[in-house]
Image: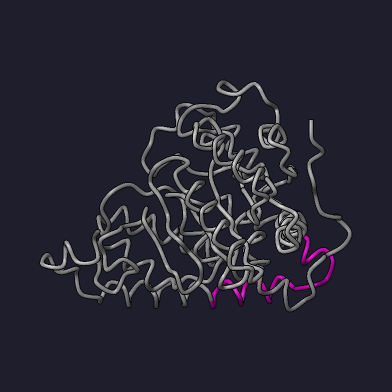
Amino acid sequence: MFKIHTSDPDKIIFEPKKALTVLKKLLTIRKFEEKSVEMYKQGLMGGSLHGYIGQEAVAVGVCEHLKNDDYMGVTYRSRGQAIAKGASIEKLFAEMMGRADGYCKGKGGPMHIADMSIGLIGANGIVGAGIPIATGAAFTAKRRKKGQVAVTFFGDGATNQGVFHETLNMASIWELPIIYVCENNLYSEMSPIKNMVKNNDLAERALAYHIHSVVVDGNDVEAVSQVTQEAVERARKGLGPTFIEAKTYRQQGHMFGDSETYRSKEEVNEWKKRDPILLFTKKLTDLGVMSYQQIESLSHEIDQRIEEAYQNALNSPVADYEEIFTDVY
């Protein structure tokens, strides 16, 4: 079994300015997701809504070490990852509501976001499908020799896909500059991963391909940041791929509105005590980095920002039916 990386409880690794940036991103993702639930309930978006609440520390901790031209592949639970990389919340809201000002002109919805200006090569609704795409981007990065890296996020269930194993084998052989981030939230849709995999740590699967592998507390944003920093440095130096298994938990169902009968309320409540934002804000206040008043002020500021972005998207024109085949190939 792997040792789970955690941060020092008596020390903040971020400088005060960086700690503020990290907290702002965590809160922005959380509040964006909460607003998305409101939108969904109001019937303002089609399709399914797969929430990211509870997993914010993984996206923020990873993306703190990525540059704009670094490639990133994401899943259908991707909005938190996109925001952490620098995506526009206005465009995200607009895309989710099928508006022309959205990232894909309203034709992609919440599960298919792309923004090449920040290296976001696309979200994918197919489990595990982003893994080979990001690996292809890593191959490109190696050939270009400009120090770029690629990152791909996926869930625990994706490690049961054949393409996962094929791709990791290829990345290992070619020593590609890629970081595989497995957000192990314990459930592959509605199925407990413990009933589907014998491994206690999914990182063992990557280790089998001689890929540098680590396990981290996915609710500890500092710990995620620390292991990602090492992984990105290894990739930029040409030392090959890294597999990061972030053990975390989604506080909502697989998608909004599912029955959640597959897990107990006691389990959910226990994990909520380890909410990543709760843990980080408590540490900031306990160590005197920020006061409760400063955090409340920041939270209110982000509330306003989210509402403005939502209203802007709401006022955006609905995607034109005649544009349905434009940009499709």
In this rendering, position of residue 231 left or right of residue 41? right
Give coordinates of residue 267: x percent, y percent. Answer: 60, 33
Which quadrant is the C terminus positioned in?
bottom left
Q: Nearer the viewer, residue 91 or 174?
A: 174
Q: Residue at x 38, y 46 (%)?
A: 125
Q: Residue at the right extreme?
A: 10
Q: Nearer the viewer, residue 13 or 213?
A: 213
Q: Residue at x 46, y 59 (%)?
A: 79
Give coordinates of residue 220: x percent, y percent. Answer: 72, 53
- Residue 263 position (above or below residue 252): above
Give the quarter of the image for residue 199: top right
Chief secondary structure of the magenta portion: helix
Give coordinates of residue 231: x percent, y percent. Answer: 73, 56
Q: Nearer the viewer, residue 187 or 171?
A: 171
Q: Residue at x 70, y 27 (%)?
A: 200
Which quadrant is the N terminus positioned in?
top right
Q: Nearer the viewer, residue 53 or 272?
A: 53
Q: Residue at x 72, y 74 (%)?
A: 18
Specify the color scheme: one colour
Is residue 290 covered in magenta? yes
Give the quarter of the image for residue 172: top right
- Residue 76 position (above or below residue 64): above
In this rendering, position of residue 215 left or right of residue 117? right
Count of picture labels:
0
Give the quarter of the image for residue 297: bottom right
The range drawn in magenta is 283-301
Is residue 292 covered in magenta? yes
